[in-house]
Image: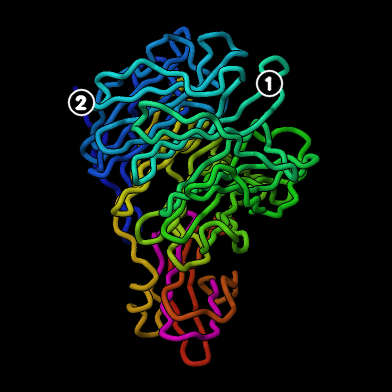
Amino acid sequence: MKKPILISSILSLCIGQNLSESMIISGDGVNSQADIAMNQEGVLYSVWLQNSNGYNIQFSYSDDGGSTFSEPNQVNDHLNSVIHIGNSGPKIDVWGDTIHVIWADERNGYTNSNIYYSQSVDQGETWTSSASIGQSAKFNIYPEIKVSADGHIHVIYYSYNRHSLDFDDIHYIESTDNGASFSSSVIASNFSDQEPCDCCAADIHVLENNSKILAFRNNNNNIRDMFSVSIQEGDTDWGHLTQISRDNFHINYCPSSGPSIDGFEQMTAVVYMAPYFDDTRIYLKVSHDNGSSYGDSILVDLDAETGINQDHPIVGFSPNGDTHIIWEDSRNFGDIYYGRLGNGDTVLTDLNNLTEEVDAATQKYPRMIVGSDASVYVVWTDFTNSGDIIFRSLQGNFVNIDEQVKQAKSFSLIGNYPNPFNPNTTIEIALKKREKISLQILDVQGRWIKTLVESELEQGIHHFRWSGKSHSSGIYFVKIESKSFSEIQKIVLLK
């Protein structure tokens, strides 16, 4: 039976993008740590933890784009033994008609915890008996799963000494027969230069050529930067240790925050948390050579004020090459934020708070899947009522950079959105050729407020964000100027 629809309208968010109202997809009990997947037909699947005298795994699906979800159904056959450790919840992926779920389970005692697997071929009505797939002589947690285009199942997990609980290795296993069997574990962290941060979950991405990249946070004498290792199709050993970030993040305790990795064609993106003066922020690194090298770090949210901390980001690509990011943000007691980096852009746009209720309880554990039409589907945990799983979608077509360049047939200050705004707005300009421009914010009397950019820009559409948080409501002006043209437009800050 489908749950009654909890959304009453679609709210216009910005140009080319619609944001649905949020809805609860979980049932009774204390729920947390959801994951989400989508099949080729656009059916959405989600799993999460439910605590009712012990932790179990609940499952629900939507075959109408998230308008309604099925009544939750339990996945695990051994009751009340699923492990509940921060960011070590159940993970889900799908290929064809088969839904794959993995989780960490302590049915044989906590120090004997292992990774378990179950699948369903009837939309979650029934599930196979759970099977142990991790190293039997270890303490195993933090599983991640990816199903590649050929249907192979790729799983990584962290392994610890069963007696001391000291970290041992990151392990990799693969199934080539749709989950009927799994390979023996291979140590992916088989290198001496760096040691993975032992409570920061890793992530895995499968390239189009079936090579695999594993991204992780290291711990080298409490310097905790981002690294990756990879393995080529047909090889037996992981290698190619690559340093992704060079933030020199020194911290003498485990931050419990690992990276997220995804890719599209030759592009690979990694997002992660790192310090920003006395705070923490989300950073993005992009590779255009399948993860062999990465460009400069991109600060995801340029306008976050001092005292704001951000954590636990997730990244995903849409088929037009846009990069989508969600993360936890400490504003308003803890919310979930979203931003998009257009293909070819260097500044994120469409930054939005996905949490509907201002000053609500803490929102945590976001996960995301991006559809073939560039729609974004997000789940997270809302602790307003002990723990509910929230679903929200961002639907709409996004213009890629090639189309933008074609559209930039003249110099133009296209406008800003939203307008009126509170407190952030995105300003869009079009350039028909490479030129040095100045983009400024002026008050109602024409006095300078802020320079958003003063540099040479390439041909195409460009986006810049301005926050009016520290300014009063009223009329402001955006002024764009170059040697060949100038233009001024009115914008309205409405608090």
Q: Report if residue 24 is visible in the image.
A: yes
The N terminus - image quarter: top left
Does 440 lie within the magenta span? yes
Mark 2 Cα shell of 10 Å, populated few (<14), some (14-19), many (≥20): few
Image quadrant where residue 198 sits: top right
On screen, residue 146 versus residue 67, left or right, reads right
Labels 1 & 2 near each other (Cβ < 8 A): no
Structural crowding at the residue carrying mark 1, measured as other residues with C-alpha within 10 Å and reported as few (<14), some (14–19) or many (≥20): some
Q: Can you name the residue that lies furthest to the right here?
A: 221
Q: Is residue 374 left or right of residue 384?
A: left
Q: Secondary structure at mark 2?
A: loop
Give 442 or 136, whichever is nearer the viewer: 136
Query: Which disc number belongs to residue 267?
Result: none
The magenta segment is 415-441
Q: Say above or below: 339 vs 110.
A: below
Residue at x 29%, y 58% (from the top left corner): 397
Q: Which residue is mark 2?
A: 2
- Residue named by callout 1: 161
Q: Position of residue 384 (x, y in %)?
A: 46, 25
State the separation of the CA atoms marked 1 and 2: 44 Å
Name the side, left or right, on which 478 lies relative to 44: right
Amino acid carrying label 2: it is Lys
Among the 4 quarters of the image, the one containing residue 433:
bottom left
Residue 325 appears in the picture as rendered: no
Q: Earlier in the sequence, mark 1 or mark 2?
A: 2
Q: Looking at the picture, how far across and down is residue 290, in whole percent? A: 51, 58
In magenta stretch: residue 429: yes
* Residue drawn at point x = 71 percent, y = 55 percent: 246
Residue 463: give x, y in percent of width and height.
46, 68
Q: Residue furthest left?
A: 1
